[in-house]
Each structure stands twice: as C-alpha cells, then as structure tokens.
Amino acid sequence: MSAAAARSVVHSVRVEFGDCDPARIVWFPNYFRWIDAAGHHFFVSCGMPPWHELEKARGILGTPIVDTHARFVATASYGDRLDIAVQVAEWRRSSFVMRHRVTRGETLIMECDEVRIFAAHREDHAPGIRAVPIPEDLRALCS
Amino acid sequence: MSAAAARSVVHSVRVEFGDCDPARIVWFPNYFRWIDAAGHHFFVSCGMPPWHELEKARGILGTPIVDTHARFVATASYGDRLDIAVQVAEWRRSSFVMRHRVTRGETLIMECDEVRIFAAHREDHAPGIRAVPIPEDLRALCS
Amino acid sequence: MSAAAARSVVHSVRVEFGDCDPARIVWFPNYFRWIDAAGHHFFVSCGMPPWHELEKARGILGTPIVDTHARFVATASYGDRLDIAVQVAEWRRSSFVMRHRVTRGETLIMECDEVRIFAAHREDHAPGIRAVPIPEDLRALCS
Amino acid sequence: MSAAAARSVVHSVRVEFGDCDPARIVWFPNYFRWIDAAGHHFFVSCGMPPWHELEKARGILGTPIVDTHARFVATASYGDRLDIAVQVAEWRRSSFVMRHRVTRGETLIMECDEVRIFAAHREDHAPGIRAVPIPEDLRALCS
C-alpha cells in the first residue's frame, strides 16, 4: 500500500498561553509533546491493544523513537487550533516511519518524520531493550 | 528540633528562555517543576537510599505530594539564577511539611509549603497506595 | 451572588503518556499547566476581551497569580479524561479567588484555589507591575 | 574554518525524576528543551549581545529554528548527568547549522543538527518575520 493511501488519524490540540515563549509563538519543544500524544492516539484509534497487555502477552514494551526530522514552516500562537494528521508512511523490517503534518486550517505549520522501532526486553535479561521484527498483525491494524 | 535549625539544602537553577511565557516572566508551573527537583536533591543530599532500594527492602514507594501552598512574591525571567532552599519544616506522624524558599540573590521570588506522605503499596494488593508512619531512621537522616 | 451560584466553566483534558512520571501517575506540575489553561478558557468563555485589547484600551496586562493552594486527592494516569470546573469563588477589591475542581467522572482528583490580581504597568513607567482595582464590567462578565 | 575546529561550548544538565516517563527513561521532548537552553548558553558564552539589544540596535529578533534532525542512540534516566556540546557546524548565507552532541560520560545519548536563521521584523511592518544575511561580526564571535 502506498503512503498516500495509508490510514491517517487526526489529533487536534489548542495552543495555550503557557505553550508560548517570550517571542509570543509556540516554543518548539512543545510540538514534540503534541506529536508524541498524536502518535499514541493513532495507535489507540487503530485498535492497538494497550502496551501493558502487549508486554504481558508478547514482551513488547512500546515503540521508542530512534530518529526524528522536523521542518518548521510557519509559527503558531495561543488560541490557535492545530490539527496533527498522523500516518505510518513506511514499514520496514524492524522499524517504521511515522509521519506527522501539523496544520492550522489550510496552513502547514510543521511536519515531522519519526523513525520508531518495536522494542522488547533483551533476551538475556540484561538491562536495556532490543528491536524486534514488526508484528504483522499490529502492522495490519495500523495500515 | 525546631524548624529554624532544620537541615537546609540549596538547589540552584538557571531560568531559561523556554521557561518564560509571552509576558516574558517565568510561567508559574515551572516553579513546581524546579521545586520537585529540589526536593529530590534534598533527599539525595541527606543520604536517603534510592527509592528502588527502599521499595525492595521496605515497600516504600516514595513521598507523594498531598497538599501544596505557594506564594508568588516577585517575578523572575531568563538569565536569572534562582536558589531553592529546602528543609523539612515539620514532621508529623505520617506526613511532613517540606518548605521551599526560592530567592534571586537577596530577593524572595516565591515560597512553597508542601505536605507529603511516605507511601507504600496497599496491604491487600489492591491498586493504589497507602500512607505509612514516617520511618524514624529516614527522618533522622533528613533532620 | 454567592460562590455556589457563580458561573462555572468546564475545561477537559486528556492525560497523555508524557504527562506521567516513572510512578505511572500524572507528574503534579502538569496539573498547574492544565489549571492555567482552564483559567484562560474561563475568561474567553465569559466573553472577556483579549489581553492585548485590554492592554491597549485600559493598560491591563493580565491576571498574574499571587497565591495558590492545591490538594491532591486521587491519582490519575494516561488515558484518563479529566474535567476542570472553574469559577471565581470570591471577588475582593483588587484580587479574586479562582477555584478549580479536577474530576474524573465522579472522582475528585485535585482541587486548587488561586488568588490572582488584575495587573497594569506601573504609573511611573518603572519596570514591574501593580495591582489595580477589579474592573466592574469585567467582574460582571465572569460572575 | 572546518567544523572540527569550530568553537564548542558544553552545557550540563541533570536528569530529574519528572523528566522521565512511565518507561523510566527521559521523555524525548525534554531533550529539545535542554538543547534549546544549550544553544542559548552557547551564544551567551560566545559574547553575543542580548537579543533585546540586538533588536534595538539592528532589528534582529533571534535565531528561530527552521529544521531539526535528531538521532536517539541510548537512553538516559534520572540521576544521570548529561553534557551537551554545542558548535556551529556550518555557516550559510542566511542560515547556520547548530550541532548538539549529548553524552553521559563516554556514552553518546543523542545528537541533533538544527538549522536556524537570523530573523528580523518584516520591512513593510507586516506581521511575521524574515531571514536576514548572517551578520559577519556575530558569526565571528561564534566561530
């Protein structure tokens, strides 16, 4: 399936006074806060089981971020309503690209591609995590 | 021992651009972020064992906040260095008052009294936590 | 008009994964972030003109917080939907008490009384702000 | 001057309990918070005049971010001390690349390249900002 046809879920946020900096625009780390929430909502909206169930049943801990690339196109300020459209733009063997487009009406505010993995505990019980192949059924839910 | 003579530990923070709001002053929820960190540093500085050790050895999970009362006296802005002096102003049977005074040089910026408890898992394995009596040895460390 | 009959406005938030700490519950400074937003929404919802208009027309800069007192009654975690009911519980000559009750369904999570003032630039053009008497028309809007 | 020889300034942060998420590791938007502070410290450390002076004297408002690319290599948790080494890796005509390497001792935790511009008010007094050519003297200070 091409990225253009991938399932897309929109998460909306309202920019608050406290999200803005002395330049009166959104302080950029807040975009990553909203994008993280939008990604969680995407999974819930696709019917993904809660992580604590996936951990118990399959040892899957979550989808930690390994790379993110964002472009800031226009500024936003308090009172603005932003829509964050989320889709998985690409599935790889053990990672996937989650794409976020943040818009205010027709205006593109920022866009961001995240690379994430499916993580499990290490097999030797050592601390830390390891990437596991993308589970086919979970991929199907989100496509 | 009177509160005046209680052990006091100072934690310093630098106010960053992103901590300030469109009025160019510290956005007030950030004070609670710094105060929380100052409280953790107080315990570490007093020689309190890490919480994961206390949990294993005694089932103590931490010191959740149950009440906080803050007074905002003067504003601060980016570039300012703030000192947060922390002490336990009062020990009760199963709670204690942690007092924070935030100053910039000689200027009082804000002050805050928190009531916190020592928390453990519930005995019947139900979800949630319960307050336990203040452990004497931990109290001695922090006094 | 008694506080019980004061105008009340509800602002809802969803607790996100990133709002929670290693104890898997809301990290408490986030409640102040939500409460601050709820207060802004209260004013907007009451028909209060935007602050930049009030500044131009009357020199009023906003309603800075001078005191806050919060009680944390129950914990919340990610996925929870919280309702924040806001009202002005008391009007004084140059300050007012903004009361917030945060609930999840029927469960009280926390409650908070803030004292705020109406602030203007100082008359002598010195830096800093001063409290001004509560404007009657703005009080009427919010009652 | 090659990037390898560029002036580098280190900013250190301590990871706090509240910076970590329910997975007990740093919640990733916090890295952008620290990186933003590290960039401000870099400029101060290089002797850059404060932005309010640059605005008055030359109409320069700051260096807004237009693009960021981060790689997350290892996790960090509370109690960790992180060093953020900052340098300008590349100067272009009206933008520059600010490079951040976040380490814990010898361990690389994350790295991030930001593209930033020097911004001024628009010449026609329209809202919004425009990029201006990099001022030679400011570039010299930071190289």
Image: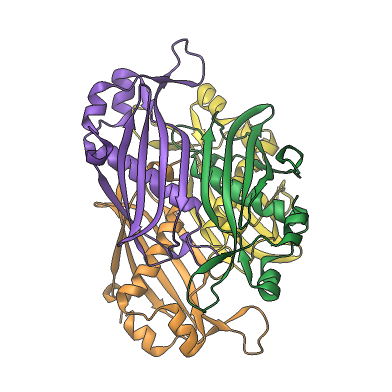
Chain colours: A orange, B green, C purple, D yellow
Q: Position of residue B14 (x, y in %)?
A: 64, 40
Residue sitting farthest toward the top: C124
Left or right for C91, reference B16: left
Q: Position of residue A84 (x, y in %)?
A: 33, 60
**Above or below, C142 relative to A28:** above
Give the quarter of the figure containing the N terminus of chain B. Answer: top right
In this view, the residue in front, A96 or B120, is: B120
The residue lying at 49 percent from left, 44 percent from top is B29
Residue A79 visible in this rendered orientation of the protein: no
Residue C8 lies in what quarter of the image? top left
Residue C39 vertical position relative to residue C55 in the rendered view, above or below:
below
Tell me if residue B133 can be seen: yes
Whole-percent x, y for residue A11 in the image: 31, 62
Image point (38%, 67%), residue name: C79
Looking at the image, which is closer to me, C122 or B127? B127
Residue C137 relative to residue D36: left or right: left
Tag count: 0
- The residue lying furthest to the front in this view is B93
Residue found at x 70% / y 62%: B135
Image quadrant of residue A103?
bottom left
Query: For this view, does B56 lie left or right of residue C14?
Result: right
Give the image quarter of residue A26: top left
- Residue under the image location 47 percent in, 10 percent down: C124
Q: Nearer the viewer, residue A84 or B52?
A: B52
